[in-house]
Image (cartoon, rainbow, N blue to C red):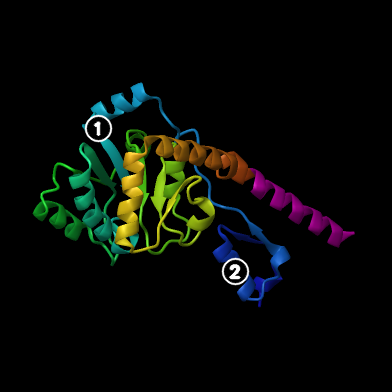
Amino acid sequence: MILKRADAFSAISPEIASEWTSSGIPSEKIHLIPNSVDTKRFVPVETAEKISLRNKLNLPQNATIAIYTGRLVSYKGLPLLLKVWNEIQRRHEEVFLILAGTGGLDIHNCEDELREYVKTSGLENHVLFTGAVQNVPEYLQASDIFVFPTENDAFPSSIVEAMACALPVVTTPVGAIKTIVTDRETGLLIQPGNQEQLFQALDVMLSDTALASHLGGAACKSVQDQYSAETVTQKYSDLFLHLIELMKARME
């Protein structure tokens, strides 16, 4: 098999590394190198800039804003999120949810379903559909909490981008997320599809602002340390230098 003759294999998550090993690739040839985020574009902002961004984006000034960014597809847990948000907005005053993205051509597109639920549940004043946007960093920086209740994912860049903006994260331990987010250190992890856990996690984030702030700060530092473009580029550079040394040794 030609593939097995390669000297190195890159994996963005331990799950993908396991796929390599299950295919017969020696573990010493596998290099765990995650995807990166532009930490010069996705950055935290001070309160004054957050207020300015909310004005610019026509977002409520006094609300606590939770945001989801990504495709509006069912396996991201969005139908469940709206059901939970319907309960959350009854318990907490001045809360607002942003769904940034579209369903696109994905066969699991649930955008129409989500919009209909918002309409029939009277959530128009509590949920915003942005549609396709190019200024994702601004929406993240204008928000307070990132929620991503996905049921199936490999390496969702949306989470890393939100963490880079110092947003505390509510998500699920699927795919690479279990290595990106540490429960109660850089975010809150819930089981996929668990409505009660999702409600409780959001309730905690909205009620305990000190905890939310701590988690957001730790999340930002984690991204800067592990997922910045500079850090990931250095890992690839080290890998290429290693391969050059292997090639030189074979030529001697």
Mark 1 and mark 2 lie on one chain; the one further toward the N terminus is: 2
Residue 46 quadrant:
top left
Q: Residues within 10 Å of mark 2 (few under 14, many from 20)?
A: some
Residue 57's disc is: 1
Instruction: Look at the picture and state if 199 lies above or below 145.
Output: below
* Residue at horizontal 60 percent and vertical 65 percent from the top: 17
Q: Residues within 10 Å of mark 1 (few under 14, many from 20)?
A: few
Judge left or right: residue 222 versus residue 126.
right
The front one of 124 and 207 is 207
**SS of the residue under disc 1:** loop
Q: Give the total of numbered labels.
A: 2
Q: Quadrant of the C terminus?
A: bottom right
- Residue 233 among those drawn in magenta: no
Judge left or right: residue 197 versus residue 159.
left
* Residue at horizontal 59 percent and vertical 40 percent from the top: 225
Determine which residue is flagged by label 2: 18
Task: Find residue 103 and report its horizontal and vertical position in percent.
Answer: 26, 57
Q: Amino acid at mark 1?
A: Leu
Residue 109 quadrant:
bottom left
- The magenta-colored residue range is 234-252
Task: Find residue 245 and report its horizontal and vertical position in percent.
Answer: 80, 54
Please identify the dominant SS of the magenta region: helix
The front one of 59 and 62 is 62
- Residue 15 in view, yes or no: yes
- Residue 104 in view, yes or no: no
Residue 115's disc is: none
* Residue at horizontal 37 percent and vertical 36 percent from the top: 209
